[in-house]
Amino acid sequence: MRLLVTGGAGFIASHFVHQVRAEHEVVVLDKLDYCASVKNIPHDVRLVKGDIRDADAVRALFARFKPEAVVHFAAQTHVDNSFGNSLEFTSNNVEGTHVLLEVARTYGALKKFVHVSTDEVYGESSYELNSSNTEGGTILQPTNPYAATKAAAEMLVMAYGRSYGLPYVITRGNNVYGPAQYPEKVIPKFITLAMQGKKLPIHGDGLGTRSYLHVSDAVSAFATILDRGVLGEVYNIGTAQERTTLSVAEDICAQFNLDPETAIEFVQDRPFNDRRYYIDSGKLHHIGWVPEKTWEHGLAETIAWYKNHNTDEYWSPAPTFLVYGKNGWIGGLLGQLLEKGGYTYHFAEERLEHCEKDMDTFHPTHILNAAGITGRPNVDWCETHKTEVIQTNVAATLHMIDTAHRRGVHVTNFATGCIYTYDEAHPRGGPGFTEDDPPNFRGSYYSRTKCMVEELIKEYDNVWQLRLRMPISADLENPRNFVYKIARYDRVVDIPNSMTVLDELLPLAIEGAVRGLTGVYNFTNPGVVSHREVLDMYKPGHPWTYFTEEEQNKILAAPRSNNFLDTTKLERAFPGLMNIKDSLKKYVFSR
């Protein structure tokens, strides 16, 4: 099943992604807020940076990925923060959910929409009555701004189910704890404070009770509900075991051999702090789920994770990009995409050979290198400027990559697929060249430098090497656009080639950088298209003039490569890539 997980770089959702990714085709939508981490996402899972409040971005993701189900985790969840910034919670949790619902409604092809809510929508449970909250028998009485926004979002989900037939399921869960939880929640907060030798602060008297569910049990519950949950139902997810905040702090003190009398301090309580949340998960038990992790085992496992991870590094700020090639076509487009995506980015102020200054100034986590010499106006120029070409395309590029490697910075290097040409093993209409095939084309000095540097780059594990070919975009008046070029030649060859539709693939370059992909990738659309087919799409019926490859080579300073690049590896990383002809029709010639 194609599964869209919102907030998938967060705590619970990322554990869920890890559990279900083998069974489902998963894409994560996350705005990478302070409590999310790209380190939570496996490299084989697509991560799209975006805000669920951005209707256009969500709509585009639905159109591209075509999800069959949505599991909606994305939300602001920290109760303390909701008292000081309640409007932000309303914006994220209510407006964001509403946008997602509206896109799902117009999309019209979802089989299931799982809305992740909280047991706090019930409000405070009574000690005197000692009864648990059930899904259908308890009125929602939220007592803090966070819980109120989650209750409001639930009402919207139910309304869309009733009014538009949205196939929803709602979950209401207990407090969840476990490895890789941002240390603002009580258990990781206490653990990290204990590790630092600091006091553990407890609101009020610490006798309020909560039920704590280990994240492995929580995600198994979500997987069960995704698989067997009945549409239109609400499921509580929890455990009957209750603990006071004070007892949790004492258990953590015991794990660190601390004296609770001196390690714990009591601080002023919240404006209103619910004393108890107690829910009945019997309905979920009936469809096959029960919690399995004991408190003792779960707490020990959680503490071990924090002991083995630097939390400052793990939740480092969202990616900061440094872009080389500001004045180039692709570099400029990258800047526009980063701006639209809300990323922090900077265009380099220095040349590649002086990249240390840029890295010292901007402290990037990621570099997008679109700088290089391709020729002015084409690769023939390189034949008479070989020193300049090798200085930039080889020496300076390697220097930047080596510097980035020593500083732990990821590099996405925009390269070329013009290092192959059709041969006996790869004839026209035959198999494409894979990333592992040795280059067989060195007809131009430009291609020779690209072959040279790619072989050396393979020794660096921080580089994502992207082989573009004959790039095309909807900006048909850009002189670097392949369509612009061939439409102005007196004659052109008519040979099938792999090509790159930038409008579709460049956003994936940023996505892959965030995911930390490395290695060499053929970065073209699947399939081939001929020059004639491209020109006929551009101006149908126009009398273009063609000549043979042999005739072309007679008038060029350097031969050109023609090839078909196998995109199997790219398609595995980014399922749903459009065939080159379909992509041209959609992104370039339909506008």
Image (cartoon, grey):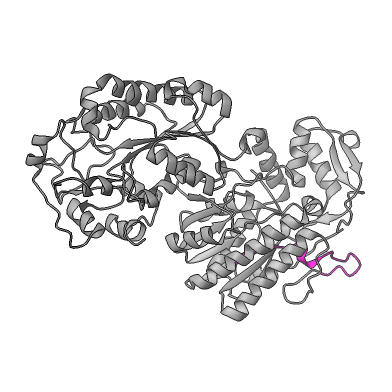
Taking depth in this image into account, of 82 and 357 the one nearest to the observer is: 357
Residue occupying the point 91% across, 67% down:
128
User: Hey, which quadrant is residue 143 in on the image?
Assistant: bottom right
Residue 299: horizontal and vertical position, in percent?
71, 44
Q: Residue at x 73, y 76 (%)?
A: 136
Is residue 397 shown to the viewer in this render? yes
Up/down of 495 relative to 550, above or below: below
Q: Is residue 581 left or right of residue 403?
A: left
Residue 122 lies in the magenta-colored region: yes
Instruction: Say which quadrant the N terminus sits in.
Output: bottom left
Name the residue nearer the viewer: 387 or 575: 387
* 310 on left or right of 19: right
Relative to 2, is 237 on the left or the right?
Answer: right
Query: Which one is nearer the viewer's eye here, 154 or 200?
Result: 154
Q: Residue furthest bottom?
A: 163
Q: Is residue 283 visible?
A: no
**In the displayed structure image, the side of residue 120 where residue 2 appears, left or right:** left
Residue 28 drawn in magenta: no
Q: Where 406 sits versus 480, above or below? A: above
Q: Which residues are magenta?
A: 114-131
Residue 155 in the image: x percent, y percent?
69, 72
Horizontal and vertical percent position of residue 334: 45, 42
Identify the residue at horizontal 28%, vertical 32% (top origin).
376
